[in-house]
Amino acid sequence: MNRKNIKNALSKGPVPKRLLETQHLCKIILNEQQVTQEEERTGFWIFLSDIFRHSGLRLWGMQILILILVCACILSVHNVPNVIPLFTPLFLLASIPSLFQNQTYNMCEIEAATRASGAQIVLAKLVLAGAADLICLSITLVLAAIKTDFSANMFQLILYAVVPFLGCMVAMLWCIRTCKRHAFQISMIVCFSTSMFAGGLSRLAPKLYQLSAIGLWILAFVLFTCFFVREIYFLTEARKEGKMYGSIA
């Protein structure tokens, strides 16, 4: 049906008898529906519990499996402090599938259209992953200290555990925020590479490895902490403004 036929059909329709009254009633309804109160929104902690039911169980389950693997390896190795950096990136590696779940299933656009911003979703998953990682790293450090009969400096153990973990976390957040494609793969490669580099350095250059814990590891800890705080600031600001954290692939 062309435009002319449509106009003819509409012109033959019934003449509205109560047009003004209908318009007035519509104006009243629209005025009554104007937003006079703030719309009730889901609180962040309620939203966090929803995210936990959706992907938190799998995330925590992967962390527990990695923790069991790390504890078994720690109990079987001779020099525990030197192998700590080999294992700590694995905790973040177990969190990557959940953090990149939207990209894996091509759901970025749908998440962007929901009332929960992409930044809020990433922050909720990051809180869940951070809680699991904190527990796992604490257990790992305690077990390492017991295995070495507290002969190693606890501060040195913390540096060995936290520095590679922070480095991988900063790289992962940077990939989410700036990389449109291959962010998932880059994050996985960073975690594997960090583990392999730490393990190789401890075997090929053990003196340099131990000496670096005094100066270079402290410097790396400060740098990674600054970058991590900056990324968290970007993430929280994006959440407040209801924006996406990162690009839609």
Image (cartoon, rainbow, N blue to C red):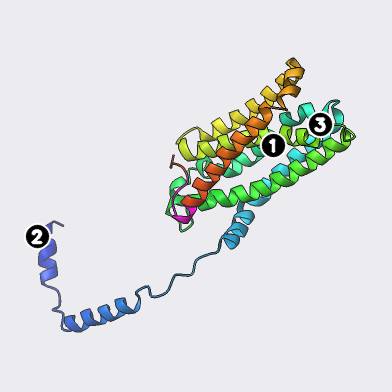
Which of the labelled discs sits on residue 66, or is there none? none
Q: Residues within 10 Å of mark 2 (few under 14, many from 20)?
A: few
Residue pushed farthest top?
Answer: 204
Q: CA distance from mark 3 to mark 1?
A: 18 Å
Q: CA distance from mark 2 to mark 1?
A: 73 Å
- 148 left or right of 198 in image: right
Could you tell me the amino acid type at mark 2? Lys
- 45 left or right of 139 in image: left
- Secondary structure at badge 2 equals helix
Residue 32 placement (x, y as % from top left)? 34, 79
Q: Residues within 10 Å of mark 1 (few under 14, many from 20)?
A: many
Residue 168 visible in the displayed image: no
State if disc 1 and disc 2 touch (CB < 8 Å).
Answer: no
- Secondary structure at badge 3 equals helix
Name the residue: 72% across, 27% down: 213
Q: Is residue 35 above or below residue 156?
A: below
- 205 left or right of 30 in image: right
Magenta-span inclusion, residue 240: yes
Residue pushed farthest right?
Answer: 149
Residue hosting label 2: 4
Q: Earlier in the sequence, mark 2 or mark 3?
A: 2
Closest to the camera, between mark 3 and mark 1, is 1
Q: Is residue 191 above or below residue 30?
A: above
Could you tell me the amino acid type at mark 3? Cys
Q: Residues within 10 Å of mark 3 (few under 14, many from 20)?
A: some
Which of the labelled discs sits on residue 162, or is there none? 1
Residue 103 placement (x, y as % from top left)? 50, 41
Q: Earlier in the sequence, mark 3 or mark 1?
A: 3
Residue hosting label 3: 73
Closest to the camera, between mark 2 and mark 3, is 3
Residue nearest the observer in this picture, 2 or 33? 33
